[in-house]
């Protein structure tokens, strides 16, 4: 009798655990992320690791950012993630509002499905010639289970323009939802097609870069000549990192930014002139041949646009921030003498072979397609 009771209780406990997993979709989560906050969800979708995103894609969700940020539990020591990332955090001297955060722990199942998932997403694209900035070889469709964190993303300011609260996940704190992965199944790779731009880049070679990437960014700005708007734009981005040893609230580290930590949602351990830390992380293994310099100016533009937006520009949308950052990255490539520059998905952002009268049109088309289809942003 006691054996039957134990079996019955075990079955009941198992059923309760199963019931706690909520089956849903990317769009349902993005429609109301806070209603899923703290719940364990199961969602099927396509995972992608680009230059500055690590996401589960949404299609036709109608949001400013149509994706869920993907993270691993702290200590996972996995390989896949964004090649570059900027995350804002309240500094030790932050005077604004900080919401108390409590997160239930997640244990990652590092089985063969996860190892395949992580390996595919961390495989870089290497073909076609020229520089492909943060380009991955695969996207991966899968069924993912994990803890869903929800927020109302944004950088909130008072009447003087001072930042008084920061919410959101992932790059630029722009994501309203984050999935902290527990397990993955039904893993299917999809090799990304770069062939439509290979003909333009096949004869382009990129030499390995040495030295300080910030110094190289300053050099790319100088290449445009004094008083040139393009050069000034690149210089503004490079200058956002400050001088060597300067404590300006910009913190650079290297590695893969793929783990969720509650420490990053509270106050940091350092002060900042405006009470905000700009935590920048670069995966040097995916930023070869001068790509780190271009990534530096992309992130530097985002820092400068947030820190010194200019009159009337503080409420800039995430789409506008990303667009401006990629414009600066492209200018850095031009100033650095690159013949071509590609972005994840194979979008050709710059080609010296374009006729002067068509360059603006071709670049704008590439930016729009990239932001909509790879960054998953609505204008």
Image: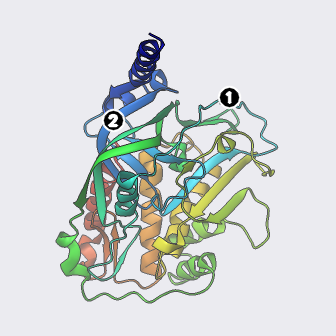
- Which residue, as the protein is rendered here, is positioned at the far top? 1
Mark 2 packing: few (<14 Cα in 10 Å), some, or many (20+)? many
Quadrant (top left, top right, bottom left, bottom right) of the C terminus: top left
SS class of the residue under badge 1?
Answer: loop
Q: Residue at x 21, y 77 (%)?
A: 198
The answer to whether 149 is drawn above or below residue 300 in the figure is: above
Up the image or down, 14 lies above or below 125; here it is: above
Q: Residues within 10 Å of mark 1 (few under 14, many from 20)?
A: few
Viewer-side residue, 175 vs 71: 71
The residue lying at 53 percent from left, 57 percent from top is 85
Classify mark 2: helix, strand or loop. strand
Q: Nearer the viewer, residue 24 or 350?
A: 24
Q: Which mark is residue 43?
A: 2
* Number of residue marks: 2
Residue 348 is left or right of residue 38, and the answer is left
Q: Which residue is mark 1?
A: 99
**Residue 309, can we see it?**
no
**x, y percent for residue 359:** 28, 71
Q: Quadrant of residue 363?
A: bottom left
Residue 239 is situated, as x and y percent measured from the top left of the image, at 65, 68
State the residue at coordinates (53%, 75%).
Answer: 293
CA distance separating discs 2 and 1: 27 Å
Q: Using the image, determine if residue 228 lies above or below residue 303.
A: below
Q: Nearer the viewer, mark 2 or mark 1?
A: 2
- Colour option used: rainbow
Q: Is tag 2's residue or tag 1's residue first in the polypeptide sequence?
A: 2
Between residues 115 and 277, which one lies in front from this camera angle? 115
Report x, y in % for residue 355: 23, 79
* Image quarter (top left, top right, bottom left or bottom right) of the N terminus: top left
Q: Is residue 148 left or right of residue 75?
A: left
């Amino acid at each position: 009798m006691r054996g039957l009771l134990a079996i019955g209780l075990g079955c009941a406990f198992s059923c309760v655990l199963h019931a706690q997993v909520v089956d849903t979709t990317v769009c349902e989560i993005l429609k109301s992320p806070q209603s899923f906050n703290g719940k364990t969800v199961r969602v099927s979708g396509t995972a992608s690791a680009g230059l500055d995103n690590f996401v589960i894609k949404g299609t036709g969700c109608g949001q400013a950012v149509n994706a869920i940020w993907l993270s691993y539990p702290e200590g996972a020591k996995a390989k896949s993630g964004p090649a570059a990332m900027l995350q804002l955090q309240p500094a030790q001297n932050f005077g604004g509002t900080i919401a108390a955060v409590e997160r239930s722990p997640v244990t990652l199942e590092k089985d063969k499905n996860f190892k395949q998932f992580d390996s595919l997403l961390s495989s870089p694209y290497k073909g076609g010639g020229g520089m492909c900035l943060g380009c991955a070889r695969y996207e991966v469709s899968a069924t993912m289970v994990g803890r869903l964190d929800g927020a109302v993303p944004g950088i909130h300011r008072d009447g003087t323009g001072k930042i008084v609260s920061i919410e959101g996940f992932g790059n630029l704190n722009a994501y309203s939802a984050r999935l902290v992965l527990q397990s993955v199944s039904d893993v299917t790779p999809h090799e990304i097609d770069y062939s439509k731009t290979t003909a333009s880049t096949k004869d382009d070679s990129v030499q390995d870069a040495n030295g300080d990437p910030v110094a190289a960014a300053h050099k790319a700005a100088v290449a445009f000549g004094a008083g040139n708007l393009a050069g000034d734009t690149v210089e503004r981005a490079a200058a956002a990192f400050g001088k060597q040893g300067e404590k300006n609230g910009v913190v650079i580290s290297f590695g893969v930014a793929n783990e969720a930590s509650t420490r990053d949602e509270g106050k940091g351990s350092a002060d900042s002139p405006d009470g905000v830390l700009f935590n920048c992380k670069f995966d040097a293994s995916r930023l070869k041949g001068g790509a780190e310099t271009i990534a530096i100016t992309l992130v530097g533009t985002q820092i400068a646009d947030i820190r010194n937006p200019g009159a009337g520009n503080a409420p800039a949308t995430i789409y506008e921030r990303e667009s401006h950052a990629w414009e600066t990255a492209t200018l850095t490539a031009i100033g650095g003498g690159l013949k071509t520059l590609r972005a994840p998905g194979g979008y050709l952002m710059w080609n010296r072979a374009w006729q002067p009268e068509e360059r603006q049109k071709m670049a704008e088309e590439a930016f729009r397609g990239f932001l909509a289809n790879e960054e998953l942003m609505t204008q």
